[in-house]
Amino acid sequence: MAKKIPQPTIPPRERAFLAGVELRDHKNVLSLEDSLAELALLADTAGVDVVGEITQRLQRPNVETYIGPGKVEELRALAEETLAEVVIFDDELSPRHQRELEKALGKNIRVIDRTALILDIFAQHAHTKEGMLQVELAQYEYNLPRLTRAWTHLERQAGGGGGRAGSTGGVGLRGPGETQLEVDRRTIRKRIAHIKKELDKVEAHRMRYRAQRKRSRIPTVALVGYTNAGKSTLLNRLAKADVYVADQLFATLDPTTRRVQLPGDNTALFTDTVGFIQKLPTTLVAAFHATLEEIAEADLLLHIVDISHPNALGQYQAVLQTLEEIGAGHIPMITALNKADRLKDPENAARILENFHKSVAISALKGSGMDDLLMLVQEELFEAFEPIGVRLPYKEGALISLYHELGQVERVEHERGGVLIHGSLPGRLLAQFAPWKIQPNGSAPGVHETEADLEEA
């Protein structure tokens, strides 16, 4: 009789209770119910089972426990009844809120917030060196003000004898009278400084790579959209690539660039970027700024929207809001309404298109609408010209040449400090010339600040 090979045991998933608060004076893109539904998806992606949820509408957060005292007692009873091991709040909690809530809920129930949950998911999905460094930086900066929670011996004064330094690694000798907390903070700050130096090297490499791409004159298209909208699936379809795809939030973190052939023998570089989400943690935005610069430096944004999602318009607006926050709101954009094949009435897609600027209905999974999408990209990158007048200093010779080479020049005037050009440019180039654009009053932003430079030129 064949001996059975023992199978590895899968640890049981943690049980989580969700808590959501709607503040009357705070406007969110998603409703409280939709935001909690999204939090449940995030929990599932992190490997946690949701066993219940609780909500409260407040004028402002409670000073000590974020939610009201009565709601805290209700939450404790429900968490104990459902055997929940962790309570996840839908907003970012201050260290004090987190500490007081854990005291009130009991030592057997941990309290985390939306930011910590997203950081955990990012840690699971980061695979490249850059991605792992970015996540590690975000985790350290998030945890630094919360260190007091992690230690039971923080009030002890440490003598000169080294000792344990926690999850951040070992440390050397501690000075007399220095608390363990101070040692931990100093260790983490050193690690943060080291990670930032490493990320600066990555950013320098990215800048050289972007400069090389610009010299090649191949336009770049950044795929943006709410997480799980289908960006990676679309890139695979257009470029016949093999970018990792999964039906979960934040399946891919690291940007991937592929060459795509457009109609009319033109080529563009398409870059898949990290998905956006409502209440994207500020620590993540800061840590991923080098990656997000791929979006801010793009010639065109291709915004993928999951049109089958019940709150597609809310997700669309959340992405627009984030684009403004990272300085990419001025870049030309077209919209691909993905997963149109899931609509009960496919003909309804035509009516939905009217709600979105420069849009086309597609199915990245089934391949429908690809020709229309590529034609729209081709038009925006190479055929759609916008009138623009610029006043360029002579030292910006590369931009002067670029306008003459790719633009439609109507009039040129040589002035003492630079050249005045009137004409039209492809939409993808407008962002590069924006600092020198002539305003209705005849001035150009940045010119007055550089008058001395102009005279030297």
Image (tube, grey):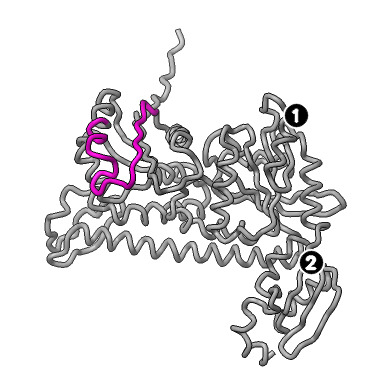
Residue 116 shows in the view: no
Quick check: 372 left or right of 329? right
Quick check: 155 left or right of 326? left
Residue picked out by circle 2: 387
Quick check: 2 left or right of 456? left
**Which of the pair 116/182 is nearer the observer?**
116
Residue type, label 1: Glu
The label shown at residue 283 is none
User: Residue 435, how many percent across, how many down?
Assistant: 65, 73
Q: Could you tell me which residue is drawn at 76 percent across and 83 percent down? A: 419
Q: Are marks 1 and 2 in contact (CB under 8 Å)?
A: no
The tally of labels here is 2
Q: Which class describes the residues within 10 Å of circle 1: few (<14), some (14-19), or many (20+)?
A: few
In the rendered structure, which segment of residues is drawn in magenta?
Answer: 50-74
**Secondary structure at numbered mark 1:** loop
User: Residue 357, how many percent across, how many down?
Assistant: 70, 48
Q: Could you tell me which residue is drawn at 27 percent across and 60 percent down? A: 185
Residue 193 shows in the view: yes
**Which of the pair 361/187 is nearer the observer?**
361
Residue picked out by circle 1: 347
User: Residue 115, how many percent across, how many down?
Assistant: 40, 46
Q: Is residue 347 inside the magenta stretch?
A: no
Q: Is residue 62 inside the magenta stretch?
A: yes
